[in-house]
């Protein structure tokens, strides 16, 4: 059974930082395309960042230079380091594996 469990969300002031974690079981993250998505109220879900099995990363233009996706193979965990947060980053952030498996999401709220 595949499980993705996100953590690390919370309330932060603009300009602050958070690190989200996605702990995975049932599959090996280093063999999958792992992604972070977000969805703000009233908006469509947005792809934020991806990391391939080769370790190549890609980012939405809106977060380039501020967010960084990484993984710890030993912990089978994917991270999203978010710096210089803005109120527009407020959303539920969800982890996805191979475009198929989803976590439950974690709320990030950035106050101005």
Image (cartoon, rainbow, N blue to C red):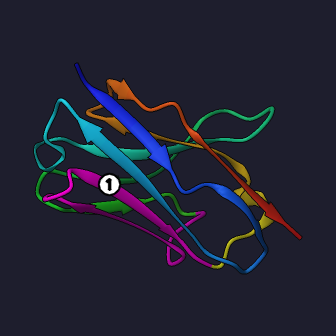
Q: Which span of residues is magenta-colored? A: 62-83
Image quadrant for the N terminus? Answer: top left
Q: Residue at x 38, y 60 (%)?
A: 79
The residue closer to the viewer here, 98 or 3, is: 3
> In screen coordinates, is 68 left or right of 18?
left
Count of numbered labels shown in the rendering:
1
Residue 55 lies in what quarter of the image?
Answer: bottom left
Q: Which residue is mark 1?
A: 78
Q: Is residue 101 above or below residue 55?
A: above
The residue closer to the viewer here, 62 or 39, is: 39
Residue 61's spot in the image, x, y percent? 54, 63
Q: Is residue 22 above or below residue 97?
A: below
Q: Residue at x 28, y 40 (%)?
A: 24
> In screen coordinates, is 71 left or right of 92?
left
Residue 28 lies in what quarter of the image?
Answer: top left
Residue 110's spot in the image, x, y percent? 78, 63
Q: Residue at x 35, y 60 (%)?
A: 58
> In screen coordinates, is 2 left or right of 73?
right
Residue 86's spot in the image, x, y percent? 75, 69
Is 73 contained in the magenta span? yes
Q: Secondary structure at mark 1?
A: strand
Q: Residues within 10 Å of mark 1 (few under 14, many from 20)?
A: many
> In screen coordinates, is 84 left or right of 30?
right
Q: Is residue 86 above or below residue 92?
A: below
Is 50 contained in the magenta span? no
Image quadrant for the C terminus? Answer: bottom right
Residue 89's spot in the image, x, y percent? 70, 58
- For this orientation, the residue located farthest to the top is 1
- For this orientation, the residue located farthest to the right is 112
Q: Residue at x 50, y 57 (%)?
A: 60
């Amino acid at each position: 059974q595949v499980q993705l469990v996100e953590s690390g969300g919370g309330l932060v002031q603009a300009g602050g930082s958070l690190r989200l974690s996605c702990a995975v079981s049932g599959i090996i993250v280093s063999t999958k395309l792992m992604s972070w998505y977000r969805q703000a109220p009233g908006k469509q879900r947005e792809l934020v960042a991806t990391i391939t099995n080769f370790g190549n990363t890609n980012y939405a233009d809106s977060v380039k230079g501020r967010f960084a996706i990484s993984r710890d193979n030993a912990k089978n965990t994917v991270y999203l380091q978010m710096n210089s947060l803005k109120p527009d980053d407020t959303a539920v952030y969800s982890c996805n594996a191979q475009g198929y498996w989803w976590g439950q999401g974690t709320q990030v709220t950035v106050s101005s």
